[in-house]
Amino acid sequence: MVADLIEEAVVQLLRDAVTALPPDVVDALRRAEARETSEVARSQLRIILDNIDAAGRLAVPICQDTGVHVFYVTGPVDASVEESIRSGVARATEEIPLRPNAVHPLTRENPGTNVAVGLPHIIYYPTDEDFLEITVLPKGAGSENMTALAMLAPADGIDGVKRFVLDTVVKAGGRPCPPTIVGVGIGGTSDLAVSMAKEALLRPLDLPNADPGLAALEEQLAEALNLTGIGPMGLGGDTTVLGVRISTAYCHTASLPVAVNLQCWAARRATARIYPDGRVRFGRSPFDP
């Protein structure tokens, strides 16, 4: 893959992600506004939708917190891919512009580019396909700070999982800028559960879980969470979450890891598929046909 082509694609990916939400998210927000029974909640959803429209019209970021950038890369991978992604993030930070959010965890030193040790975070899935697919998931601090992990006892079972997800969202309240999308990782190891919870957020809201049992659990959790009354921006109402996305992995017989990763209403994501002949196809998730 040509390094310049990858870098250019990353700049466009970030521009697409931060200035325009995926259609499935916008549709979910519009449906939420139409069915809301709280006047305050409807007004908040209307403000959110007006903000989305303005951002698209003016080609500016939807939110001032343009997040830190998590990339999922599938395909033939070599060292030049990471270098090109990092260069693209630095360019996008200046050109779009993106807020420089990346700081040293202790000194809080800010390089001003969103590029430093460990950021952007790049997760690789090497394959022998002849194309390279890059998906970006910008994560703002308000939602990311509400991430939670529980190492449940196997005896806690599915009821324990439900309680933990519910407790996590209730404890978060209005801080993650609801209505949120709730990513849940169940199984694996502690770190895998957290990773699955975040990656689950890539699945569009209009794409059901391929596992019928998990699809039913997602619906049950979404219904229960919307009965909490937290509502848009934590001001009350019927819409606390836009959806729940669950991923699972097998785990140790003595373990039941569960992780929750929230995404705010500004559920930003974008995907590019880069072909050897120089073609680049842009979409809004790795699930796009």
Image (cartoon, rainbow, N blue to C red):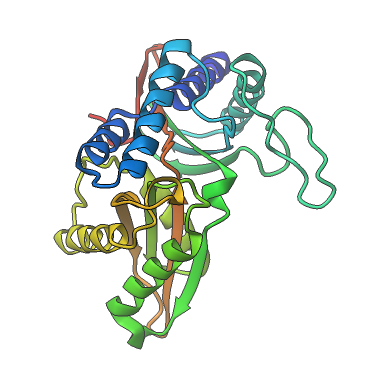
How many marks do you count on the picture?
A: 0
Q: Position of residue 37 (x, y in %)?
A: 24, 47
Which residue occupies the extreme front position in the image? Answer: 39
- Taking depth in this image into account, of 100 and 212 the one nearest to the observer is 100
Q: Quadrant of the C terminus?
A: top left
Q: Answer whether residue 274 is visible to the viewer in this image.
A: no
Question: What residue do we see at 18% from left, 52% from top?
Answer: 210
Question: What residue do we see at 47% from left, 11% from top?
Answer: 58
Q: Position of residue 196 (x, y in %)?
A: 42, 56
Q: Answer whether residue 43 is visible to the viewer in this image.
A: yes
119 left or right of 219 in image: right
Give the image quarter of residue 160: bottom left
Give the image quarter of residue 35: top left
Give the image quarter of residue 26: top left
Q: Is residue 99 above or below residue 38?
A: above
Q: Position of residue 19 (x, y in %)?
A: 46, 22
Which residue occupies the extreme bottom position in the image? Answer: 155
84 left or right of 43 in image: right
Question: What residue do we see at 31% from left, 39% from top?
Answer: 42
Which residue occupies the extreme left position in the image? Answer: 212
Q: Position of residue 107 (x, y in %)?
A: 85, 48
82 left or right of 210 in image: right
- Taking depth in this image into account, of 281 and 159 the one nearest to the observer is 159
- Taking depth in this image into account, of 39 and 159 the one nearest to the observer is 39
